[in-house]
Image (cartoon, rainbow, N blue to C red):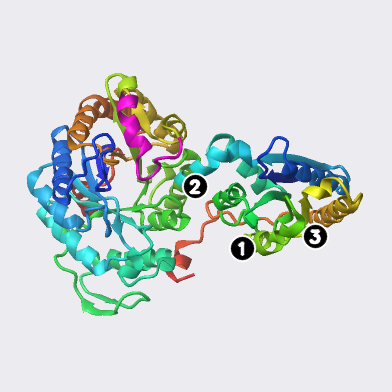
Amino acid sequence: MSTLAVVSAGLGQPSATRLLADRLAAATSAALGGDAAVEKIELRDHAHAMVDATLTGFPSGTFRAAVETVANADGLIAVTPIYSASYSGLFKSFFDVLERDVLDGKPVLLGATGGTERHSLAIDFAMRPLFAYLRAAVVPTAVYAASEDWGGGAGRLADRVTRAAGELAALMDARPAPAKADPYDDPVPFEDLLAGG
Amino acid sequence: MQFGIFTVGDVTRDPTTGSVPSEAERIKAMVAIADRAEEVGLDVFATGEHHNPPFVPSSPTTMLGYIAARTERLILSTATTLITTNDPVKIAEDFAMLQHLAGGRVDLMMGRGNTAPVYPWFGKDIRDGIDLAIENYHLLHRLWREDVVDWEGRFRTPLQSFTSTPRPLDDVPPFVWHGSIRSPEIAEQAAYYGDGFFANHIFWPKEHFQRLIGLYRRRYEHYGHGSADQAIVGLGGQVFMRKNSQDAVGEFRPYFDNAPVYGHGPSLEEFTAETPLTVGSPQQVIDKTLTFRDSFGDYQRQLFLMDHAGLPLKTVLEQIDMLGEEVVPVLRKEFEALRPAHVPATAPTHASRITEEVR
């Protein structure tokens, strides 16, 4: 069974970001044949722990479990509200404290919410470069939901959700998580280090 | 087991009084701390090396030479000596000289240094950190063991017919530790040479360091220096004590909350739960320190950080008194009772290394 991690940086209760994350998760789970463990992470719950980790260099307590969930997941849905023309600081903080290489090649679906559709391109000019740097495999369709998407335009948000979820599910099916060499279990022999290798 | 103090040498404002020591006061305080460490029966004093404010110890062998003249038993060491940005030839010369002056009471700990601008200030590139540590130490290792060295490498001007003077005291080089908090390459390096490995695990949870020390022990055995449990391991520690643990917590909290490394982040309670930091009674320090052996196996050196975050000298000296009088005697006995006979009790000393050479 594959594991799907869902990271949501919404702040409100209820939050539109959470709503979008839930719909993307449900659609992806359905596209995977219902055979996926969905692990939801609400970044607000870890807000203080994330700042602490930024200062100390290690994630503590339940936040460590959240980090490990993302590291071990077969796929990731990452959803943020758009603040000041970009992802929120809370959202960025989470990806700042992940160990390097954690998202290497991991299938990722991006989502964002905002008050108006004018900010929809923030996904492409802010989120995609971040995940390109993290070497994630981001699916082509990202889903932006403005306030009005929750009311009118029957089917249009749902269509985008279904298409994006299908892409993520296909990528997760096609790409088993790559086995990573463990530098602690399998160190580079010293002769190689000395030879500049 | 060897017990001692390691100091960063930071000049930090005391958050309770607002006073900031001068560089002169801080340097004299470090010397007073070393003096007191010897008086209360500790084994080791180690100083950091830094090349930027707010730190004072840029010239470790100068300070250690001065302390050597004031003490009789204390082992003088570093935490750490920058193997990346110092010329390995100068390290070989400086520490051999110190060794002669101190009658062999010298060892040193190699470290890379994580202050990015120090590398370009000394003409190096931080991206070469591991490569510098490996090449420079390899040269240092030869300079102490071969009277005449021909050498060519990537980072330093070549040497032809070079002799590093003075030669090590009794032809026995100082024992070397390699300190690292996250690099498997450095654990591998320490294992290769049969040197010591020091994990300053005081700021992070133990799981990470178990992997690093586990790697060092395994590879120490692989390279034929002895069994994994005979590898020479050192650990950090960070404590603040008062007779009553609530007094310790109350007095230390403002220093914790404003400390340069972790201040304004997690609470004192969260940090003590996650890391080796102990704030409480001497008995609590004893109990926590004994858990290090459970986590990492029998080890040979325990260094405590006591003089940081703006704590006044008077308080630091009281802490060292409690450490020497109430904590270390108990720990010595407890650790010794638990140690299997085939595991070294302490890190190699000059005297023990002479014996080994002869044998």
Q: Amino acid at mark 3?
A: Thr
In the image, are marks 2 and 1 on the same chain? yes
* N-term-proximal mark, 3 vs 1: 1
Task: Give the extent of the magenta segment.
Answer: B248-266
| Within-10-Å neighbours for mark 2: few <14, some 14–19, many 20+ | some
The answer for how far apart the CA atoms under marks 2 and 1 are is: 19 Å
Task: Assign a secondary structure to mark 2.
Answer: helix
Residue where numbered disc 3 is placed: A141
Residue where numbered disc 2 is placed: A54
In the image, are marks 2 and 3 on the same chain? yes
The answer for how far apart the CA atoms under marks 2 and 3 are is: 31 Å
Mark 2 belongs to chain: A
Q: Position of B29 compared to A179: left or right? A: left
The answer for how far apart the CA atoms under marks 3 and 1 are is: 18 Å
Q: Is residue A53 above or below residue B190?
A: above
Q: Amino acid at mark 1?
A: Tyr
| Within-10-Å neighbours for mark 3: few <14, some 14–19, many 20+ | some
The answer to if B38 sits in the magenta stretch is: no
Which residue is nearer to you in this view: A36 or B102? A36
Residue where numbered disc 1 is placed: A133
* N-term-proximal mark, 2 vs 1: 2
Q: Residue furthest left?
A: B69
Q: Is residue B216 above or below residue B152?
A: above
* N-term-proximal mark, 2 vs 3: 2
Q: Position of A46 compared to B117: left or right? A: right
Q: Residue at x 11, y 49 (%)?
A: B68
Q: Which mark is residue B121?
A: none
